[in-house]
Amino acid sequence: MLSSASLLLTLLPLALTTPINPRNNDTPLRFGAIAARSTFPFHLQTINASGQSFWIGKDTATYCPLVPQSQCPPGNQTVFSAGNGGASLDVVVPGGQSIFVAPNGKLSYTIAHSASMPAGSAVQTFTASIPADKQDGSVPLGSFSFKGLSGEGFLACPSHKVGSEEGPFPYQVFVNVPALSDKDVPSGSKADCQGFSAVIAEYKGDSAAWQYT
């Protein structure tokens, strides 16, 4: 597993050096994200999309139908897009892929070509912000958050019980809502979940994936 410093460096290059026009308030913010919670194993690990869920310590899962494959986006990183209270994945596929929070708190996204999601899911009250570019040339970092369904704050829930031989990775991402129960989380105990902050850096390249799977 890469060191925390190395993983932080995988996020910072998302702010590519290609010049773009300044973003206005109506333009969605595109970004990559890492989980921040010092002393915990997932600290500064990237947050990736896979299997209609978000994970820390699991590779991004994507698909591209184009032939030849050289026409496809790289598909090896997860890029978010947020604005006006909503959030989505930054994709090429027509119709896009929306990000939502299921009633049980699971941070999720729609499959390509479908807007289907569980009844009672929340698609609004996401917030993403990054300060203006720094004059010293360093990459500004911001935050991504959600407040709704009577809860707020992201949780990293390990795949196995704390202290098990299998180890905690990967962690599944949830929102801390009252409806979250033991049966919803991978380890079978929501007490194993830990809160974290989602730290983000702006992404300025072409769409990183055709679609996420």
Image: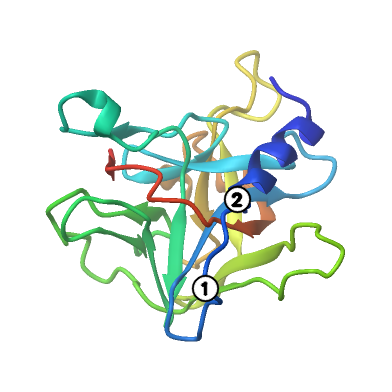
Residue 35 position, x and y percent, is: 66, 48
Q: Mark 1 and mark 2: span between their CA atoms?
A: 13 Å
Q: Residue furthest bottom?
A: 25
Point 41% across, 54% down: residue? 106
Reply above or below: 77 against 95: above
Classify residue 139 as left or right of residue 116. right
Residue 105: image x %, image y %? 44, 60
| 134 and 81: which is toward the camera | 134
Q: Secondary structure at mark 2?
A: loop
Residue nearest the viewer, comparing 180 with 207: 207
Residue lying at 41% horizontally and 51% vertically, measured from the top left:
206
Amino acid at dot 2: Leu
Mark 2 = which residue? 16
Image location of residue 118, percent across then percent down: 22, 61
Q: Earlier in the sequence, mark 1 or mark 2?
A: 2
How packed mark 2 is, by other alpha carbons closer than 10 Å (few <14, some 14-19, many 20 or more), is: few
* Quadrant into which the C terminus falls: top left
Camera sees residue 205: yes
Q: Is residue 99 left or right of residue 116?
A: right
Dot label at residue 21: 1
